[in-house]
Image (tube, rainbow, N blue to C red):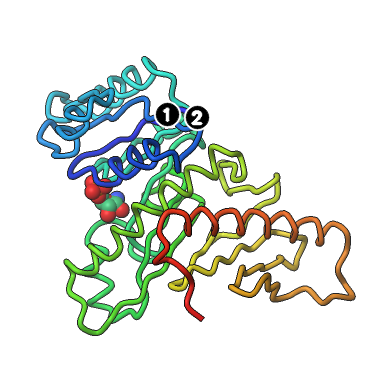
Amino acid sequence: MNIAVLISGRGSNMLALHQAIQKGSLKNVTLSLVISNNKEAAGFAKAKILGLPTALVDKDRFNSRLDFENQLTHTIQQQPVDLLVLAGFMQVLSREFVARFATKIINIHPSLLPKYKGLNTHKKVLAAKDSKHGLTIHVVTADLDSGPIIMQKEINVANTTTEESLAADLLVQEHLFLPLAIQLIAQQDIKLAQNHVLHQNWQIGNKGIRWDEHNYATIEICHGKNNIVITNKADGLLDHNIREDTETDEIRQKKESVQKLLNQAKRWLLEQDSNLRPIG
Ligand code: GRF
């Protein structure tokens, strides 16, 4: 799978993807283009030094968003690109642009959406005295930070946390979970659709794959009126809402498949960092 990463600034998520590919933890994925809309972007300079394929579509050189997006489209179409990854890309894309690449654009956002769309998420979390913060990787639709959620990761907010330290703590997780989400897409364990995200053509609930602070993951799989909610705990699988006597072959099949997916994702995370071992 070929990805293009769109950046505007520091580009640390783009670099994390590059490193994951180099290390071999992100398999069958090629970073075929790094696009910056800002000529001053530090990440863009770093990508060039690393010898990655780069393109500048300088937002200041265009009089209208239409002209900018036409050039952006042209640039993307010069390369084989299966997925556009917005990683700190500070520009809202038009409905027309998003439609052109429908279900092929994802974004990483530093909050547990739908909470705190837009900017200054860390500040908002602290102002609200939230005990949890996190990141969201979602499909991009025409409405800002509102597309179907692929994955979320929660972190705890300590009393002593500052905006800077909260941002730094979350960034470590961004660098881990963005490659993981892309790996699952590349393997087709997760498929992107306009209004939802799928596993094996089964619709996933609206929180995507939700990792808590201990790295236990929960997926809700749509199943008639009673969704199947599955959590992957340290000691095995926990399904919250299916009574054994009502379990059908179809439910069993869904549970097994989700368990396999979560086990595999968990193994992937542990391989990246042994400090991630779940507590308890
Ligand atoms: C990240 O926090 C990302 O979630 C948000 O913008 C920031 C980009 O950081 N969308 P970097 O440019 O990847 O270092």
> Image quadrant of residue 263?
bottom right
Asked if residue 221 can be seen in this view, the reply is yes
Asked if residue 149 can be seen in this view, the reply is no
Q: Which mark is residue 1?
A: 2
Q: CA distance from mark 1 to mark 2?
A: 6 Å
Question: Contact (CB < 8 A) between labels 1 and 2?
Answer: yes
Residue identified by numbered label 1: 30
User: In terms of depth relative to the viewer, which is nearer, 94 or 28?
Assistant: 28
Q: Which mark is residue 164?
A: none
**Mark positioned earlier in the residue sequence (1 or 2):** 2
Q: For the residue marked with disc 1, what is the amino acid?
A: Thr
Q: Residue at x 32, y 45 (%)?
A: 16
Q: Residue at x 51, y 81 (%)?
A: 280
> Label 1 neighbourhood size at 10 Å, few (<14), some (14-19), many (20+)?
some
**Residue 252 x/y as whole percent:** 81, 61
User: In terms of depth relative to the viewer, which is nearer, 193 or 212?
Assistant: 212
Q: For the residue marked with disc 2, what is the amino acid?
A: Met
